[in-house]
Image (cartoon, helix red, strand yellow):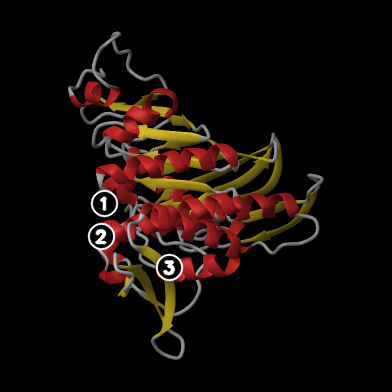
Amino acid sequence: MFSSLYVDNFRCLTNLEIRFGDLSLLVGENGTGKSSVIDILYRLRDLASGRAKAVELFPAADLCHWDQRAVQAFELAADLEDEAFSYRVEIEHDSGRRRSRIIVERVTLGERPLFEFRQGQVQLYRDDYSKGPSYSFDWGSSALSSLLETGSNSKLVKFRKFLSSTLVVRPVPPNMTSFSETEEAILERDGSNFASWFRHFTLEHPSDTFELQKSLQEIWPGFHEWRYSQFSEETRTFRIVRRTPDGRAVDTRFDALSDGERVRLLLYALLAAIRSDNRVLVLDEPENFLGLREIQPWLLEFRDIVTDFEAQGIIASHHPELINYLGRDDGIWMRRDGVGPTRITDEAPTIPEGGVSLADYVIRGWTD
């Protein structure tokens, strides 16, 4: 799981290290960098998996506006089966800030190298840390993403698969279509391809799919099942079947559901996904479309899965329910003075005995 993230020269985050637990809640005012942390995890995932180039993921507009340096640095640490991996990326922007390129990309295990790209040259290492081949590579793309799996680089491939499988989501229900032309293994950040991603998940994990359906029947009044109907030769339509009190089936296309219903299905499906694969789930304001009575049951199940299935959750949120439940023990408190850099602490504000709730304390501005 992710243990820490170091960021230098990205928006309001400079020379900053964040340490993650099994469950971490990013808390802070608007503009303190909560979503920026989520953005970085999303971009490093897409870079390492080859989904986009450096110039698309790290534009010059995201440099700290008070910093004249042209280089950004990111270092993501992860503990996988008691092995400490580290992934470092340095991005350089040209003087006109119209182009960006990777000048350093490196994976280490402990203090020992597994892979290094520097100044246009790749140096590979074997599982025993001996040097492997060396070759030139494009500065604009991740060299890590292009590696083929061989019998001698299993440690490096394990890390890349872990990072590529990280789920990073900020749901935007109006973008979530009902149509699926194919199965997709990676969920888009806004959830727009949920129908295709969920189609892939249900085929790959039938037992977890069955458990998810039972769970939804318990928490979603009238929910019966989902199904995919044929729309054309290749396209399927994702549909939800519910039952009225008199037992009549109502078949509704997914994108005809309310925003809240679509997000609720997405969030519970994500819990099933991290439970089945022991993955990391990173969520930006997941509560935006949930009703008050819907948040706590989902949050309790999220914590249970993280605890019981060795998964990890990282959430950015303003919501009082999440702050009260997670803020004291799992909060990462982000603060920023004016337009300066962000600073963080993992210590929640001290509240006098018999005082207000932690969320009320934040709402009243007493956290400084």
| Horizontal and vertical percent position of residue 244 | 29, 67
Residue found at the very far front of the displayed protein: 246
Determine whether 218 is above or below 2 in the image: below
Identify which residue, 17 or 353, lies in the foreground.
353
| Horizontal and vertical percent position of residue 318 | 27, 36
Left or right: residue 17 versus residue 252 is right
Identify which residue, 156 or 332, lies in the foreground.
332
- Are the residues at dot 2 and dot 1 in contact (C-beta closer than 8 Å)? yes
Q: Nearer the viewer, mark 3 or mark 2?
A: 3
Residue 105's label in the rendered image is: none
Determine whether 42 is above or below 234 in the image: above
Chain-order first, disc 1 or disc 3: 3
Residue 259's label in the rendered image is: 2
Residue 289's label in the rendered image is: 1
Q: Nearer the viewer, mark 1 or mark 3?
A: 3
SS class of the residue under badge 2?
A: helix
Estimate how packed mark 3 is, as few (under 14), some (14 to 19) or many (20 or more) residues with alpha carbons within 10 Å: some
Q: Amino acid at mark 3?
A: Glu
| Horizontal and vertical percent position of residue 277 | 60, 53
| Horizontal and vertical percent position of residue 274 | 53, 50
Identify which residue, 358 or 61, lies in the foreground.
358
Q: Quadrant of residue 205?
A: bottom right
Q: Which residue is mark 3?
A: 225
Estimate how packed mark 2 is, as few (under 14), some (14 to 19) or many (20 or more) residues with alpha carbons within 10 Å: some
SS class of the residue under badge 1?
A: helix
Left or right: residue 244 versus residue 94 is left
Mark 2 and mark 1: span between their CA atoms? 6 Å
Which residue is found at the position 62% from the left and 55% from the top? 161
Which residue is found at the position 27% from the left and 21% from the top? 357
Which residue is found at the position 35% from the left and 43% from the top? 36
Quarter of the N terminus within the rendering: top right
